[in-house]
Amino acid sequence: MNSLKFYVILLSLLTLAIITLAQEDANYLYHNCQNATTSTINSTYRVNLNLLLSSLASNATLNNTIGFYNTSFGQSTDQVYGLFICRGDLSNTVCQNCVTFATKDIVQRCPVGIASIVYYDACILRYSNVNFFSKVDQSPGFSLLNTQNITTEPQRFNNLVGAAVNDLAARAASAPPGAKKFAVNKTSFNAFQNIYSLAQCTPDLSSSDCNRCLSAAIAGLPNCCSSKIGGRVLFPSCYIHYEITEFYDATAVAAESPPPPPPSWLFLLLHLLVQRHYQKKKAVSQQF
């Protein structure tokens, strides 16, 4: 009996530790609920929603290399659409922890939601009775800022932030189909400080839609975060984030980045060598 009690306590502590770890990985930021007017907890839509959330959690696995998944359940007015996206620099384990926690957390925050979204530092999870896949969605959006101001050369700081995030938007949007639409940037501000920035779109957006979404997020930065040492604008389809501290995993980003292309002079050298080879071969053949 004592042995059984010990294992029950051990299992409870392990479960608590897993939940705590998932909460730490998630780091809640914001949520929005569009509450149902006619559906009930036991409606067909709610049943489909539960199936959807279970599917999202089960697809946030180690095999999901882009940290994104969308799906739908049901038909007609009872159909529910949902997705998750994890921050592009995070490990599959952190992504899985965040999504698993989010699927439980969102129903607590929006118990009668017919369309809801919850934002965390590590992931975003949303569902709706309207198909939003592959569409730019900027609502509900929100911004966060670090209340501390840049006191030295604030205008130059703002200009550097603007240049960095515009570069990120172009790079994230140019990702090939099926890849993460994600980019990071490190810009030197002075001898002691850098500006770290990040941009990401949901991978189901086209390049032009990703760029359009990020451009709208960038346009919102001056309103919320001008001369602040950190800020972010988040939409359901994309987000921008910058800080003077390194908030993303640069090592993970570097590991995923493709090697740089060979320099142009190398192509020229190879071309000249090949050309010279064929010229020699032609000269020898003419002698005979």
Image (spheres, rainbow, N blue to C red):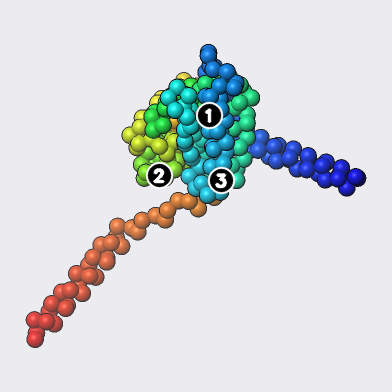
Position of the N terminus by quadrant: top right
Answer above or below: position of 73 versus 113. below
Answer above or below: position of 47 versus 257. above
Q: Dot 3: within a 10 Å radius of its alpha carbon, few (fewer than 14), some, or many (20 or more) residues? A: some
Closest to the observer, 193 or 260: 260
Q: Position of residue 41 (x, y in %)?
A: 60, 21
Disc 3, SS: loop
Q: Is residue 115 left or right of residue 207?
A: right
**Residue located at (44% from left, 30% from top):** 237
Disc 1, SS: helix
Name the residue furthest top. 37
Query: Label 3 sits on what residue type?
Result: Thr
Query: Label 2 sits on what residue type?
Result: Gly
Q: Is residue 19 left or right of residue 188?
A: right
Question: In the rendered image, which residue does mark 2 sit on?
Answer: 178
Closest to the observer, 268 or 32: 32
Question: In the rendered image, which residue does mark 1 sit on?
Answer: 48
